[in-house]
Image (cartoon, rainbow, N blue to C red):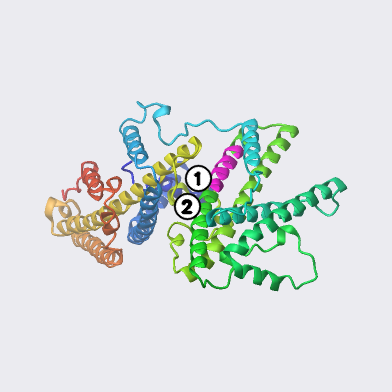
Amino acid sequence: PEVGRTDGEAPERGWAASNGAAASTKEMGPGSRLDTLDDHFGDQNWRKVACMPGQLLKKIKDAVKNREEQVVGFVGFEMSIEDPAAIPQWRVAVHKWERDPHGVGPKGNPFIPLVRQLSDAAVRLQLAEEEATRTSDVYVRHDVGPCDFLVQGLQLEDMQARLKKEVADLGNHPTDRQKANIQQKCNCLRRRIEAWFTIQGVYMPASTVQRMTLATSSTPVQAYDVPLLLPSALACIQTDLDKLLANMERRLRFGRAQDTLGKIREHILVRGGMYRVKQREVRGQAMVTRAATVLNRIDGHIEDGFQAYQRHWNALERLAVPLGCPDHRISLRALNKADMVNIDDSDGSEGRRTLSWIWLANVNLAGSAGLQDALRIEWCKSRARARRYQEETEFLRVEMERYLQTLESDAAIWRSRAAGEGAECTRHIPGFVEGARAYALRQAAIKETMHGNARVVFSRAPGDYPAVIDATGNPELDYLDVTRHVDTLSMYSSPAPSAE
């Protein structure tokens, strides 16, 4: 804390420029070598001072831009947490750790995961249990209500997607046993769909007419390709019953999209944990193959979730126009493969990383302990990124002010030397007094010119950056708290050199 975005590599970069002098200095004597290196380092220091306005302007523009992104991301992440008691607990933990990082111990560090990673056997057991719950039968009755009717339709849609994937996974040369198994599943699914069609004819008579139109082709349609013609697939909504069914489907689709997104998040976290376990502990061909098999199964579950979310999202988009209710776009978005990354995955550095939107969409902490652990760590990291950029913008503003003050002080010192104050000029031979005075005036003019140029450069710096934080009202992003730390820098600043 309280260091901003300190460039810790800056002192080391000067060596790259001086390495080119090694070929010459290795042939020199000790005195010449020291004089040559001193000239090189003096030139580097002068260029650093002369180019500082442009560097500070570039840094503050980058800091303001990234601060806005990180602050908006942090505030949005907090708003997405549904458990109101979680954030105060995290805040207390991180404040305690910042006050005494060594006293709290490893268990008190909120940036360290506390949940043990799942083992290979535990992951396989979890996947087996999930697969067992997904094979539940769809019970169709003629006296079902409209909600049950739609729920059964959505379940049939999921069964079609799973069966279609099984057929695609057979390959080009399936065995007779595999063919028989697929055919039995197709026959069972077709019977359930036909039974469901009888109920659909009661609630949605228009679907019967549309299905007769689609059945004109002589080519047989597989059970997993039979169109179910749910309300989202109809061309228009005409009656009140159609509107009721469409609205009920919209609500069911929205809930299923939320659940599917939650499952995708959990599988992504499990996959990330398995990757870490594999890299750290798995050795040998047998164990590597077994771990790769488990990872492939997890990737399959993520892909299934992606396809299911796409179906629900497309249906919600189709229903939004006739119903005039695009509320799902507030908390959900179109899902892309690039969005399905782990909560701590990023192509950039930790300070510039931003969360994928899937981790900001109504995160419920009532799930697994691993998800709670990951969200706590990410909240701490997001908070740290926002505060460091907040400090950086204020520190850079102070650095620009002190750069100008330094040039003013240097110019005043050279002016005083030219005027003969402090007996600077009288120390020289009388014939050289005018030359020394001219040199002092030239140095003062250089400092004043640099001061004027720096003011012009600094005038292009963004001037409204404090408003980003002030408007949030978040206690973790207190703008006055940062300025308090900036004021403490005065005790570390060295006094201006005396004219004497």
Could one spot residue 156 in this view of the protein? Answer: yes
Q: Is residue 336 visible?
A: no
Side (left or right) of 112 relative to 426: right
**Is residue 271 shown in magenta?**
yes
Quadrant where the image shows the N terminus: top left
Quarter of the image for residue 267 reads top right
Q: Which residue is mark 1?
A: 344
Magenta-drawn stretch, dominant element (helix, strand or loop) = helix
- Where residue 432 sits in the image (x, y, percent)? 21, 59
How many C-alpha atoms fall within 10 Å of the one at disc 2: few (<14), some, or many (≥20)?
few
Q: Nearer the viewer, residue 399 or 43?
A: 399
Residue 1 lies left or right of residue 420; in this view the side is right
Secondary structure category for the residue under label 2: helix
389 relative to 243, above or below: above
Q: Residue at x 53, y 52 (%)?
A: 256
Image point (37%, 27%), residue name: 102
Amino acid identity at mark 2: Ala
Q: Nearer the viewer, residue 65 or 268?
A: 268
Which residues are drawn in magenta?
A: 263-275
x and y percentages locating residue 374 in the rendered image: 47, 40
Sequence-first tag of 2 and 1:
2
Which of the two marks, 2 or 1, is nearer to us in this view? 1
In the image shown, does 319 or 404 lie closer to the viewer? Answer: 319
Number of numbered discs:
2
The label shown at residue 4 is none
Q: Is residue 103 magenta?
A: no
Q: Which mark is residue 17?
A: 2
Tell me if mark 1 has few (under 14), some (14-19) or many (20+) residues whose alpha carbon lies within 10 angstroms of its own.
some
Residue positioned most to the front: 143
Residue at disc 1, secondary structure: loop
